[in-house]
Image (tube, helix red, strand yellow):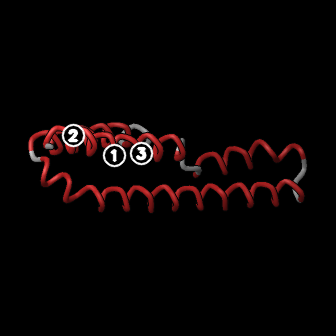
Amino acid sequence: MNKIAPGLALATISSLTFLAYQHPTAYQTLLPYLSIGLACLSLGAAIWNSGLSAAYSKMLKYTKFEARKAIDDAIGSVRVPIVGFASVFGADYLFRVSWVLTEATS
């Protein structure tokens, strides 16, 4: 999954860019849905990571020092990576493209 996700993200960004420049009215129609979807995805990932952090802090109280490496590996393997950066840059990208299109058409 870690090898497939970056390619899918790049394909999504490329297709949205193509859609924005070739069909600006269709892109402006999709923009609110894309923004809401991105916000929900980011919120879900943040809640997931917060739950993992809470579980990690509770587990540390009841485990021995030698077992902490296994706990780190288990928690780290299911954590959603760089969710904050992806959501901020993704939202910024969507709104900038929309702004450029609005300025170009007016």
Name the mark nearer the viewer: 2 or 1. 2
Q: CA distance from mark 2 to mark 1?
A: 12 Å
Q: Where does the image place residue 65, in percent across and percent down from the top left?
A: 89, 45
The residue that mark 2 highlights is: 103
Disc ID at residue 8: none
Q: Is residue 5 left or right of residue 78?
A: left
Q: Where does the image place residue 47, in percent across and percent down from the top left?
A: 59, 61
User: Tag 1: residue type?
Assistant: Phe
Name the mark nearer the viewer: 1 or 3. 1
Disc 2 secondary structure class: helix
Up-down relation of residue 41 to residue 104 (above or below) = below
Q: CA distance from mark 2 to mark 3?
A: 38 Å
Other-residue count near label 3 (Cα within 10 Å), few / some / many at <14 / 14–19 / ≥20: few
Residue 44 vs residue 72, the one in the foreground: 44
User: Tag 2: residue type?
Assistant: Glu
Disc 3 secondary structure class: loop
Up-down relation of residue 9 to residue 40 (above or below) = above
* Residue drawn at x 16%, y 38% as measured from the top left: 104
The residue that mark 1 highlights is: 95
